[in-house]
Amino acid sequence: MAHADPDTLADLVLEPDAVRASVHAHVSTCPECGAALDALRSTRAATGADPLVAAPADLRERVLAEALADGALPTAPSAPVPLRRRTSVPLWLATAAAVIGLVAGLGLGRWTADDPAAAPEPDPDPPGAVVASAALTALDSDAPRGDVEAFDAPDDVVRVSVRARELGGEQGYHEVWLINLDGKRMVALGFLPRGDDGTFEVPRRLIDEGYRILDISVEPDDGDPTHSGVSIARGELA
């Protein structure tokens, strides 16, 4: 049986005799529903709500008889119309809504755990294993300038994650490059956003072919796509 919704749980507090026996049986054996029901009862007691007084057993029949006598209702039989039993929300029940929200964090949130449609979508591309990493340093000293990690990814791709620090205040854009170990070839990966953290996808074959030196340069806004020759951080992936 599905878990009881908040309205049904409130009915168990307000009018337990009006709730189906199957619901009573479920709540008595379900830890989540039982916890929510206890929270509602505790909240009602804490707010000082008056105990419920049962209506006279013949109240409905008396009201219908008077209405029929006054001609307010048709005498022909008709299909019963379901009525909501509560037309207003008492203060204690409004307060209990917040309590149910808190209880959800303690277990009621698991109500939808078995529903695949309600489960959060998994990350389609979770980070893979680290295949290489390097510490970034300044070229003119061993001052640390951050770090870089290369993660395994599908489709023969490697994700290169750069976390650079203290790159200085020289005017221009910070561009990331991969330089081949032969020192003669390089490819541009892209510009670092503000904060100097960025992730770039590169074909795995580049790493296999020796493009393992990660370089960060300062590039002026001059429209020239080649390396400026001003490197501010570098590290070799291994």
Image: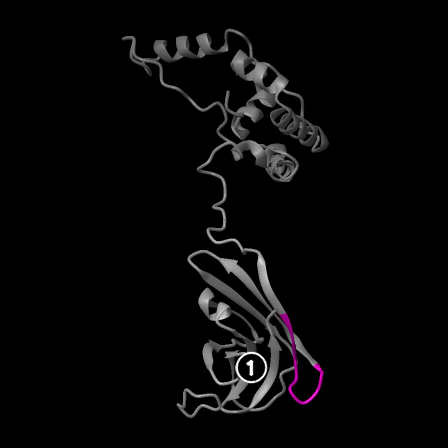
Instruction: State yes or no: residue 152 in magenta.
Output: no
Q: Nearer the viewer, residue 87 or 228?
A: 228
Q: Quadrant of residue 148?
A: bottom right
Rendered position, 73 above or below 206: above
Q: Residue at x 36, y 9 (%)?
A: 69
Mark 1 secondary-structure assignment: strand
Q: Main secondary structure of the magenta part?
A: loop
Task: Look at the image and tell me whether residue 203 can be seen.
Answer: no
Q: Quadrant of residue 78?
A: top left
Rendered position, 24 above or below 142: above
**Amino acid on which the number 1 mark rests in the picture:** Ile
Find the magenta span and give its range.
134-143
Residue under numbered circle 1: 216
Q: Pick the quarter of the image with the C terminus.
A: bottom right
**Within 10 angstroms of label 1, few (less than 14), some, or many (20 or more) residues?**
many
Q: Residue 200 location in percent, x, y?
A: 49, 69
Rendered position, 149 above or below 173: above
Q: Nearer the viewer, residue 111 or 101?
A: 111
Q: Residue 149 location in percent, x, y?
A: 59, 66
Q: Residue at x 64, y 87 (%)?
A: 139
Q: Nearer the viewer, residue 179 or 51?
A: 179
Task: Look at the image and tell me whether residue 54 can be seen.
Answer: yes
Q: Residue at x 40, y 8 (%)?
A: 65
Q: Residue 72 location in percent, x, y?
A: 33, 16
